[in-house]
């Protein structure tokens, strides 16, 4: 799977996200502080990763900033993106299952190495629900 990753700094788990995704066999595209050619600010970096997903250059994305909030807000401004700020594996699994989230937002401040491993496992193993109510909710997002 091709996954776009953006961070506004190399603090916390930013570089480890890239390494772990590659270790798991994914192709990774980097943005922001993880790329020497781009602006590192969270709004710009997260937008680029989200656009990779919305325009078909990536299957999913991971966006990171100090709290994860700004990165998720920026990503969610891009049409077709459903970014979820996840602080644990349960939230990541639910975001994939009930929301068909395609962009994972992480806090560089709060996410430890152990929690990152758990979140990525839940996110990457997660599948969207086929329940009619869940599908209707996700479809309604396109109408909002």
Image: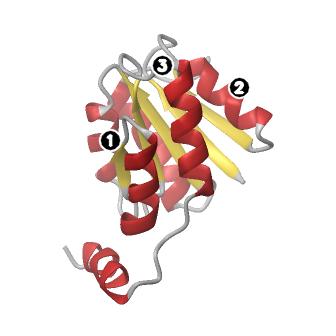
Q: Hey, which quadrant is residue 43 in on the image?
A: top left
**Disc 3 + disc 1, Cβ < 8 Å:** no
Residue drawn at (51%, 32%), measured in percent from left and top?
A: 6
Residue pointed to by mark 3: 112
Q: In the rendering, which numbered label is found on residue 136?
A: none
**Quadrant (top left, top right, bottom left, bottom right) of the N terminus:** bottom right
- Per the rendering, the mark at residue 19 is 2
Q: Quadrant of residue 86?
A: top left
Residue matched to label 1: 72
Q: Nearer the viewer, residue 25 or 48?
A: 25
Give above or below for 19 relative to 5: above
Cα–Cα span, label 3 and label 1: 19 Å
Residue 92 locus on image (x, y percent): 44, 48
The answer to whether any part of residue 69 appears in the image is: yes
Q: How is the image coloured?
A: secondary structure
The mark tally for this picture is: 3
Question: In the image, what residue occupies the spot 55% across and 36% down?
Answer: 118
Q: CA distance from mark 3 to mark 2?
A: 15 Å
Q: Position of residue 65 (x, y in %)?
A: 37, 24
Secondary element at image label 3: loop
The residue located at (45%, 20%) in the rendering is 40
Dot placed on the residue nearer the N-terminal end, 2 or 1: 2
> Of label 3 and label 1, which has the lower sequence position?
1
Residue 35 seen in this snapshot: no
Query: Which numbered mark, 3 or 1, is in the foreground of this view?
Result: 3
Q: Quadrant of residue 79?
A: bottom left
Q: Earlier in the sequence, mark 3 or mark 2?
A: 2
Position of the C terminus by quadrant: bottom left
Q: Is residue 2 left or right of residue 140?
A: right
């Amino acid at each position: 799977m091709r996954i776009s990753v953006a961070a506004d700094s190399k603090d916390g788990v930013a570089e480890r996200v890239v390494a772990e995704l590659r270790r798991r066999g994914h192709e990774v595209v980097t943005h922001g502080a993880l790329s020497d050619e781009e602006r590192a600010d969270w709004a710009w970096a997260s937008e680029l990763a989200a656009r990779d997903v919305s325009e078909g250059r990536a299957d999913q994305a991971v966006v990171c900033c100090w709290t994860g909030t700004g990165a998720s807000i920026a990503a969610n401004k891009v049409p077709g993106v459903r970014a979820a700020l996840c602080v644990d594996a349960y939230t990541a699994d639910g975001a994939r299952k009930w929301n068909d989230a395609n962009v994972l937002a992480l806090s560089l401040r709060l996410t430890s190495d152990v929690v990152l491993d758990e979140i990525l496992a839940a996110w990457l193993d997660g599948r969207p629900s086929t329940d009619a109510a869940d599908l209707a909710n996700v479809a309604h997002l396109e109408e909002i």
